[in-house]
Image (cartoon, rainbow, N blue to C red):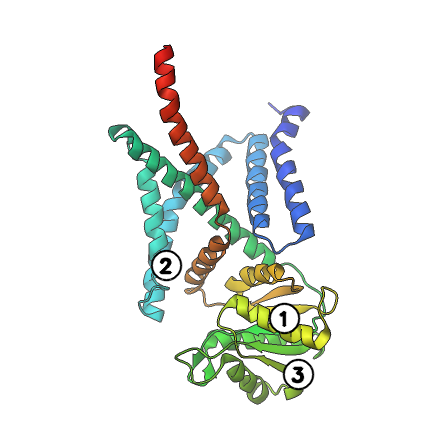
Amino acid sequence: MSLSLWAVAVLFAPAVIFGVAFLVSFVREPRQFRNAIWFLLLLMSLIGAGLAISEQEWLIVLAIMAVGLAPFLVIVFLAINAVSVIRHEGLSLATILPGALAFAVMLFLGLFIWDSGRGPRWLTSLISLVLLEGLWFFFSFAALLVYSSFYRILPRKRRYDYIIIHGAGLDGDKPTPLLRGRIDKAVDLWERQHRYGVFVVSGGKGGDEVMSEAEAMRRYLTEERHIPEASILMEDRSTTTMENLVFSKQIMDGRSGAGPRAYRAALVTSDYHVFRASEYAHQIGLKADGVGSRTKGYYWPTAFIREFVAISRSHMWPYIVIAALWLVGFIGFDMLMPWLTNRL
């Protein structure tokens, strides 16, 4: 039995609302975290409405099974990836991240099936808070994963006045393979725009490095890629992504003038790092697009988890709001129950 036009309109109403919210936010500024939330809500509502109007029960059952199996598949994938990345990179705080996330998913599932009626009310309520915070954590993780992938593949047929290359560590006095990938990607971009624009090599000297990352990148560009010295500017003070951008912006402002119309820059970094670098650029008023170089497949999950943690630290307000609402509900329940008991 086919659905009426009114029923179809009702089913697609959430998709329209989320779609408008996403488009308005995206057109205003694509480099914002909230775009990821609107985008995933849009996709979920479209898929849900599409399944409903298809009236194919097997599709709905298949979708439910996929959702149910997804956490277990994620656990298996992360566990396998944790072993792989530790084998390649060694044991460190960074390389155990996939395993830590797998454990977090297992803990979340365990709490979800917990028979909360067996414990005291405060414990039941605390578990509900953990579950609520966990739901936002995993939802926002999926949202950022989907949107950052979408953001990276957007076509950008622009001519950049500056091409910023973000540092990524050294192997002695040479760029690491990860950093070489970024440099080569930047050179490819420079050549595609007919060798127009200036490179800004950005990276200071770490405590265990023999020279600044900027100097190592300059040498690689001139000696290996035969780039003229006149086409390279050095920013050799930064130690973080935000400092990369702030100090590079100071150099570009001094050379071309400040303001959003003075120049346009490209931020060349690893693909997993593109969205965070672009979001930081937006925060400091730098008109720039992120351009990503390829990351080895085994290392990508670890790198993306680190990016998600860094971005989440800049967007803590949803966790605070959830905790505040939980606290109001917890206290309100204690105050309301005696009053209801006396009235009954």
Q: Amino acid at mark 3?
A: Ser
| Element type at mark 3 | helix
- Quadrant of the image containing the N terminus: top right
User: What is the C-alpha distance between the residues marked 1 and 2?
Assistant: 32 Å
* Nearer to the camera, 263 or 299: 263
**Which mark is on residue 249?**
1
Which residue is at 61% across, 88% downward? 226
Which circle's residue, 3 or 2, is located before the other in the chain?
2
Q: Are marks 1 and 2 in contact (CB under 8 Å)?
A: no
- Quadrant of the image containing the C terminus: top left
Residue 342 percent location from the top left of the image: 35, 13
Which residue is at 39% across, 80% downward? 208
User: What is the C-alpha distance between the residues marked 3 and 2?
Assistant: 39 Å
**Which mark is on residue 97?**
2
| Residue 189 in view here | no
Q: Are marks 3 and 1 in contact (CB under 8 Å)?
A: no
Q: Amino acid at mark 2?
A: Leu
User: How many neighbours does mark 1 have within 10 angstroms: few (below 14), some (14-19), or many (20 or more)?
Assistant: many
Residue 206 percent location from the top left of the image: 43, 77
Residue 325: which quarter of the image? Answer: top left
Q: Is residue 309 above or below residue 194?
A: above
**Residue underneath mark 3:** 231
Which circle's residue, 3 or 1, is located before the other in the chain?
3
